[in-house]
Image: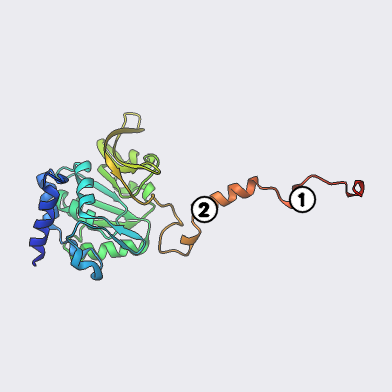
Amino acid sequence: MEPTVLRDDMVASLEHEMKGLVRSEHVGLALRTVPRHEFVPLEASDGAYSDRSFDHRGTRILSPSTVARLMEALDVREDDSVLVVGAGVGYTSAVLAEIVGEQNVHAVDITRTMVYEARQNLGSSGYGGVFVDCRDGADGLPEYAPFDRILVEAAAIEPPRTLVEQLTADGRLVIPLGGGIQRLTAVERASDGTPDIGREFGTVAFAPLLVDGEQSDTIERNRTTREDREFADRNAQARHGWEHEWIDWDGYS
């Protein structure tokens, strides 16, 4: 079956009242236009237009329904400047490029191999104008700030202050917040620059926002920066042999 027909069926399913995930005309049009099969591994290409996610190189290619939820929560408008934190394979950035234009989409990823793959996928599918760079996502992209919209495809306990500061005055940051239970949350920038938690868009399950040393393509992956901190804290509290009280062995028979 032709990819265009498969995309129509995919979006029709997401628009159906049983799901109702696609409510905006521009989101539906973008999902119908972007060739998702260009962004999934070859071995999974047969299921590119099914509503499922794929694990790939230590990251997850989001399902169409999850992407639809992100797009609706982000509420992008034509010509908005957008930052995507967690470029992955580039599919979400391509959908955004259909709505706001390639020149207005910027994406960062902490994993260098994913940056290369995202660039390749975006270029081969007609979205080579999207800017993709290797950065720590929590730092954002200050050179191109401020942004009207920032989308974080990773979970955090609280919104990264740096990202909030890179929003325009009426901008919106969409991020999964929480530990055990995550909620897709819209965050705005208060007048003093602090995060203003707004509307929630239901529960989600995303991997945590990584810090330097935790990316999947480095040798540090099996011993992450976060683990190193935890080990250091435990070791600082543990007693070593020379710290034990002196025992007067001569007093024992």
Q: Can you say whether 153 is above or below 193 in the image?
A: below
Tell me which amino acid carries mark 2: Glu
Residue lying farthest to the top in this orientation? 191
From the viewer's perspective, tell me whether residue 143 is left or right of residue 3. right
At 31% from the left edge and 43% from the top edge, which residue is drawn? 175
| Residue 163 visible in rendering | yes
Labels 1 and 2 touching (C-beta < 8 A):
no
From the viewer's perspective, tell me whether residue 167 is left or right of residue 37. right
**Which residue has dot 2 on it?**
227
The dot on residue 252 is none
Image quadrant where residue 58 sits: bottom left
Q: Tell how many labels.
A: 2
At 49% from the left edge and 56% from the top edge, which residue is drawn? 224
Mark 1, secondary structure of its residue: helix
Mark 2, secondary structure of its residue: helix
Colouring of the image: rainbow
At 47% from the left edge and 65% from the top edge, which residue is drawn? 219
Q: Can you say whether 59 is above or below 74 in the image?
A: below
Q: Crowding at label 1, few (<14), some or many (≥20) Cα neighbours within 10 Å?
A: few
**Which residue has dot 1 on it?**
242
- x and y percent of residue 10 in the render? 13, 56
At 52% from the left edge and 53% from the top edge, which residue is drawn? 227
- x and y percent of residue 193 in the render? 35, 33
